[in-house]
Amino acid sequence: MGVVRVNAFQSALLRPAHTLFAPIVYRLAARLDQLDVAEMIGDPAISAYALRNAQKLFELPMVVNHFQLGIELESSDSFVSRDQYGVPTEVTGSPTLGRASADLLDGLIDTAARLSAEFMDRAGVVGVLTGPNTLSSLGKVSPAAISELYVAMAGKYAEARVSAIMLAEAPEIPIDDLLVASATRELVNICRFYRLKSILLAPFGAETGPSPVDLQFGRRRLFPLDLLESQAPADVSGWAGHLGVLTTAGEVPETLPPESLKSWMNAFAHSSKGGGR
């Protein structure tokens, strides 16, 4: 048998020994390649190219295949409005979960598969799904309908060989633990069957609820986005208590100067080697 290689992201999920800073980068990747989000969503090859460049530039240990929250509610009959940061604010029309065109959702899977095939031991690829509380708040859909969508997408993400599936809630969306448990139970079972990690990103939530997912990142376990606006300090060991993956409280702003994010990546890399202690 050949040696199974594990990238740093997978290692941090399985056997956390230090802090692995893994910010969420999507729109910034588009801007750096002079693309808009519509081009990223509509063309898996272009999207994978831009995300590949961002991974190389920032030495990202984790790459998301998209961060267009609410996309599962979009179709020819509905439109999701978003603010300047890409956060979904409302749905107009007649949203029906899962009616987004097959080409649209399959394109996201294609992007994930392209990244997984290339990165292998270099970075972990995370397949993103909009969190259940955000879908329920935006589209007024039932836990059963959300679960059905998650099951279908989880199987496709597993075939794309992602390292984990992230259910990402929009900022300031209250977290209903019972809804999370009901909507994610089958998805979690699929993840465990394929040995994938399930992650709930809940910037407005805590980490103590009865969630079935493997990892729940609430407000106390997320890196504040506003800190990224300044250059990183020489010593970031104050964050060393967050063993394992430390991600951001949402997507890195597309307007962030690349030098700022680079400084934080370098500082955490230096700290993980013992240089910041």
Image (cartoon, rainbow, N blue to C red):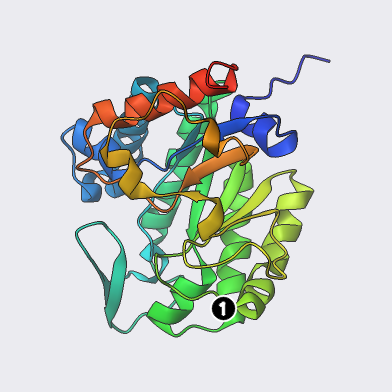
Disc 1 on helix, strand or loop? helix
Query: Whole-percent x and y of residue 260?
Result: 28, 30
Left or right side of 109 for 54: left
Give, as a three-letter code, the residue at label 1. Ala
Query: Given the current orientation, which residue lies at the most extreme left position?
Result: 34
Q: Is residue 2 visible?
A: yes
Give the camera-side residue of 133 and 220: 220
Left or right side of 142 for 35: left
Pointer 1 residue:
145
Give the camera-side residue of 25 and 222: 222
Query: Whole-percent x and y of residue 238?
Result: 53, 36
Relative to residue 12, is residue 158 depicted above or below?
Answer: below
- Quarter of the N terminus within the rendering: top right
Dot 1, crowdedness within 10 Å: few (<14), some or many (≥20)?
Answer: some
Give the camera-side residue of 277 and 160: 277
Q: Is residue 118 visible?
A: no
